[in-house]
Amino acid sequence: MQPHAFYEYLMQARKRLFDWIRPLTKDQYEREFPFGSKTIHAALLHIAGAEWAYSNRLQGQQVTPADSPYTPEKVRSFAELEASWSAMAERTRATLAQVSNWDEPVQYRIYPQGPGTPAVRITTTRAGVAAQLIVHEVHHRSQVMSMLRQLGVAAQNLDYSALMFAREQEPA
């Protein structure tokens, strides 16, 4: 299966996640937890920023965290995040659909300790970048779901099979 097909799963799961987040109060959305990115807002910014970076890398562009449109200074509310991420998702979908050679090498630099520190060169393939984009969101989405559960939201069952497999009731 091509990575762009897995992205459709992310879109379905993200829609459900957003449905659980949308009714939260500002205090709930920004409540600090002792794990992950600490708040739902910060976790979502991190996921969206990573998608932005990986999508750009698939297009051969070098980007840094400072270039990201997904920072707390640039995106202050869930409504802003949802609107921006929805627009970006269409670009990500198009980027993934246009890849014809998933084995093509990709190189980029990251700065793990921040600007002014030595860079680390990452070498992978387009498939590797796409896989990271997908599994990264799943990993951090589970943290957001844990935060939601602690807020009393019954956030559960975003499993691939639950959202993407055809189902029909069998006769008794």
Image (cartoon, grey):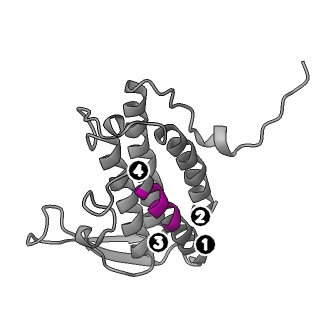
Q: Element at badge 1?
A: helix
Question: From the viewer's perspective, is the residue at label 1 or at label 3 nearer?
Answer: 1
Nearer to me, 40 or 96:
40
* Residue under the image location 40 percent in, 44 percent down: 139
Given the image, on which type of amino acid does mark 1 rest? Ala
Q: Is the residue under label 3 in contact with that under label 1 (CB below 8 Å)?
A: no
Q: Residues within 10 Å of mark 1 (few under 14, many from 20)?
A: some
**Which residue is at 61% across, 57% downward?**
8
Mark 3: secondary structure:
helix
Looking at the image, tell me whether mark 3 or mark 4 is earlier in sequence order.
4
Amino acid type of the residue that numbered disc 2 sits on in the rendered structure: His
Judging by the rendered image, the residue that carries numbered circle 2 is 4
The residue pinned by badge 4 equals 78
Residue neighbourhood size for the residue with mark 3, other residues' Cα within 10 Å, grouped as few (<14), some (14–19), many (≥20): many
- Residue at numbered disc 3: 126
Quarter of the image where one finds residue 90? bottom right
Query: What's the distance in space between the residues labelled 2 and 1, CA to CA?
Result: 6 Å
Q: Which image quarter: residue 128? A: bottom left
Q: Are marks 1 and 4 in contact (CB under 8 Å)?
A: no
Q: Which mark is residue 27?
A: none
Percent coordinates x, y for residue 6 in the rendering: 59, 56
- Residue that extends furthest to the right in the rendered view of this protein: 171
Q: Indicate the quadrant where residue 132 lies.
A: bottom left
- Of tags 1 and 4, the one toward the viewer is 4
Which residue does the numbered mark 1 point to in the structure image? 97
